[in-house]
Image: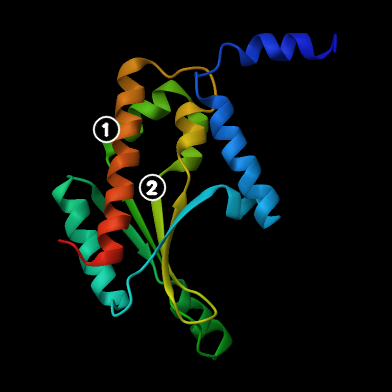
């Protein structure tokens, strides 16, 4: 217990809901047995929506939020080109607001690992489409509080990414 005291003192300086963030991730880890699964948000794409429908909607929603589409990686095409075999649909979309990104980096270079914001549109092994992105709650709430203005920007980015995903999954322009 003596060794835990310094760590507990540090933890008490964390964001108020840091414990909830870690507990939620811990539950997902126990349920799935997989840390990658525990550290993402995923949204099922509505039946009848095609990959092209989802892509078009996501790009329109991102544009509505002045969030730039800074790149796309059609992974399935790379796999097909390299293997000579068809592969299920997997495309990674990269979105960014450069000014917000620069403020995050000015705060801590480690935030570069979260950049740009990525959303993956993937066809699962049963043929269903899903949208995945990293769970940003650990970045926002999982440590000592971010400066208020930076926290507001990070929460705004989170809201935008979730809006892009949720509306992309339903085709809601």
Regarding residue 70, the answer to whether it shows in the image is no
**Quadrant in which the C terminus appears:** bottom left
Q: In the rendered view, tell whether residue 147 sits above or below residue 66.
A: above
* Residue 84 falls in image quadrant: bottom right
What residue lies at 59% left-to-right and 41% top-to-bottom? 25
Left or right, 169 with respect to 173, comes to right
Compared to residue 116, the image places residue 125 above or below, namely: below
- Image coordinates for residue 147, horizontal then vertical, percent: 38, 15
For the residue labelled by badge 2, is the local secondary structure a helix, a strand or a loop? strand
Q: Nearer the viewer, residue 125 or 84?
A: 125
**Residue highlighted by disc 2:** 117
Say which residue label 1 marks.
99
| First in sequence: mark 1 vs mark 2 | 1
Q: Which residue is located at x 59 percent, y 55 percent?
A: 37
Q: Residue furthest right?
A: 2
Q: Residue shown at 71%/55% (left/top)?
A: 33
Within-10-Å neighbours for mark 1: few <14, some 14–19, many 20+: few
Label 2, residues with CA under 10 Å away: few <14, some 14-19, many ≥20: many
Which quadrant holds the N terminus? top right
Q: Is residue 97 above or below residue 163?
A: above
- Tell me: 3 left or right of 159: right
Residue 94, given in percent of the width and then of the height, sits at: 36, 55
- Number of callouts in the render? 2
Residue 52 appears at what percent x and percent y? 26, 76
Scheme of image coloration: rainbow
Q: Is residue 161 left or right of residue 24?
A: left
Q: Are marks 1 and 2 in contact (CB under 8 Å)?
A: no
């Amino acid at each position: 217990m003596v060794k835990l005291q310094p760590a507990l003192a540090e933890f008490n300086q964390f964001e108020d809901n840091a414990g909830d963030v870690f507990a939620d991730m811990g539950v997902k880890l126990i349920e799935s047995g997989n840390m990658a699964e525990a550290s993402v948000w995923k949204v099922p794409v509505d039946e009848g929506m095609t990959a092209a429908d989802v892509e078009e909607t996501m790009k329109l929603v991102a544009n509505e939020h002045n969030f730039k589409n800074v790149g796309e990686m059609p992974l399935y095409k790379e796999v097909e080109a390299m293997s000579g075999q068809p592969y299920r649909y997997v495309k990674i979309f990269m979105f960014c607001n450069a000014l917000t990104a620069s403020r995050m980096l000015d705060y801590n270079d480690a935030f570069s690992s979260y950049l740009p914001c990525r959303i993956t549109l993937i066809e699962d092994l049963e043929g269903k489409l899903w949208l995945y992105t990293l769970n940003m709650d650990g970045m926002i709430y999982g440590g000592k509080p971010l400066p208020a203005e930076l926290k507001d920007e990070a929460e705004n980015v989170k809201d935008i990414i979730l809006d892009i995903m949720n509306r992309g999954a339903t085709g809601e322009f």
